[in-house]
């Protein structure tokens, strides 16, 4: 495990709460990685996420594309985003991190923070943009910024394109795994933890592909229906934090404790909420065949070992949830336009190819998909460094 280029802890002078920044590596002097806000966030957690971002960037490297692969980084703030002090804390964090964001850290929404909140706080902190460090790498900065702004203005069925691209990528990873196993979509049941941006979009795309979502979990508990949930109704009844208004539940829907999504009779589990959701103890409840990591680091390593030993395949976060980050850069660098049809088509092609390559490598090497993804990234990082230079 390599030592990151930069690792720092910041303490807010107003609340005493802490924030963190880890830059794992730079490519052409720039790194990429979102900013999360959650109670209990730690420096070690942020460091793990930053390493994952380096791999996500490497996995999407295409020498023929305009998209320049970046290094990996991550930010984190130890605070409940619902706390009345959270927004002011976010602004002060961004003010403290301003030299890094201006110079070499591009960031955006992650767990607990939406992009519009990050953008608003960035302006208050005196920043031009949360991704301004990448601007010097663009051939046409004005055109690229306009293209990205136009993409963020696109809505599909009432939901912003930026809120859908990640879930589209997760869904394609799941569908690729099913295709390789010869499992028909209509016979596949899904349980989702978290109905926020990533979980909600994943549930929508999987449902529209013909799968049946039988359970979803939010902060209030689990909603289940073995015949299938009305995902569109649940999505329409969410608040800003992904919590569903129970008034929309149908007679066949039942409420259960929060962790019951783990034990749902389903072929696919999608943890799309918090890190470390599946540990060595609660993994025993899982009967699913696949776990698709829509969240970052939801399965602890010791749990993954136990799951693998009994035939449960974990589709790793560095592959599964990488489409959001890639979509930003595909759009900004001009590989795709500000169009939902073009975006979804590009995501589907790229995520299917990446997932298929990862699963094929795992089979060939006799390893887990995570080990295979790490091996693919390890093969590509030196190639990227040789082409673009590596500043560490």
Image (cartoon, rainbow, N blue to C red):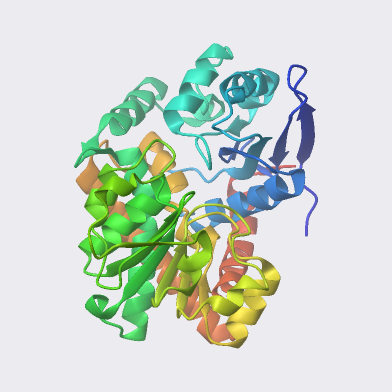
Report x, y in % for residue 200. 35, 51
Q: Residue at x 64, y 50 (%)?
A: 49
For residue 6, side relative to residue 235 (left or right) = right
- Seen in the picture, residue 337 relative to 315 is either above or below; the reply is above
Name above or below for residue 323 compared with residue 17.
below
Q: What is the quadrant of residue 307 in the picture?
A: bottom right
Place of residue 358 in the rendered image (x, y in percent of width and height, measured from the top left): 49, 72
For this rendering, which residue is in front, 125 or 248?
A: 248
315 w.r.t. 37: above or below: below
Q: Residue at x 56, y 54 (%)?
A: 296
Which image quadrant: the N terminus? Answer: bottom right
Residue depicted at x 61% and y 22%: 85
Image quadrant where residue 190 sits: bottom left
Q: Of 64 and 204, which appears nearest the observer? A: 204
Residue 365: tell me if it is visible: yes
Q: Is residue 372 left or right of residue 117?
A: right
Quadrant location of the C terminus in the rendered image: top right
Is residue 151 rendered to the left or right of residue 376?
Answer: left
Q: Position of residue 158 (x, y in %)?
A: 22, 38
């Amino acid at each position: 495990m390599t030592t990151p280029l930069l690792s720092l802890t910041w303490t807010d002078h107003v609340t005493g709460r802490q924030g963190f920044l880890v830059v794992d590596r730079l490519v052409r002097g720039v790194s990429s990685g979102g900013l999360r806000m959650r109670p209990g966030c730690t420096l070690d957690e942020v460091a793990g996420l930053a390493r994952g971002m380096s791999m996500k960037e490497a996995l999407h490297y295409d020498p023929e594309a305009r998209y320049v692969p970046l290094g990996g980084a991550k930010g984190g703030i130890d605070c409940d985003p619902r706390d009345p002090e959270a927004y002011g804390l976010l602004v002060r964090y961004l003010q403290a991190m301003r030299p890094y964001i201006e110079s070499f850290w591009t960031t955006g929404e992650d767990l607990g923070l939406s992009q519009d909140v990050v953008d608003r706080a960035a302006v208050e902190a005196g920043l031009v943009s949360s991704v301004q460090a990448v601007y010097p790498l663009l051939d046409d900065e004005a055109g690229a910024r306009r293209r990205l702004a136009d993409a963020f203005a696109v809505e599909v069925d009432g939901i912003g394109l930026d809120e859908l691209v990640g879930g589209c990528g997760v869904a394609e990873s799941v569908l690729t795994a099913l295709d390789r196993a010869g499992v028909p979509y209509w016979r596949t049941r899904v349980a989702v933890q978290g109905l926020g941006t990533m979980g909600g979009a994943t549930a929508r795309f999987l449902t529209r592909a013909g799968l049946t979502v039988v359970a979803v979990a939010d902060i209030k508990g689990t909603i289940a229906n073995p015949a299938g949930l009305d995902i569109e109704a649940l999505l329409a009844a969410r608040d800003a934090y992904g919590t569903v208004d129970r008034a929309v539940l149908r007679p066949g829907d039942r409420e259960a404790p929060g962790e019951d999504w783990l034990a749902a009779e389903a072929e696919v589990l999608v943890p799309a909420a918090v890190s470390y959701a599946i540990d060595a103890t609660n993994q025993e409840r899982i009967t699913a065949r696949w776990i698709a990591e829509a969240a970052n680091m939801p399965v602890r390593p010791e749990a993954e070992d136990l799951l693998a030993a009994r035939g449960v395949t974990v589709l790793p976060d560095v592959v599964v949830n990488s489409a959001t980050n890639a979509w930003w850069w595909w759009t900004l660098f001009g590989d795709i336009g500000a169009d939902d049809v073009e975006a979804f088509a590009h995501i589907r092609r790229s995520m299917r190819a990446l997932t298929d390559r990862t699963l094929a490598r795992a089979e060939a090497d006799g390893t887990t998909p995570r080990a295979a993804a790490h091996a693919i990234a390890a093969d590509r990082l030196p190639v990227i460094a040789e082409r673009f230079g590596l500043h560490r």
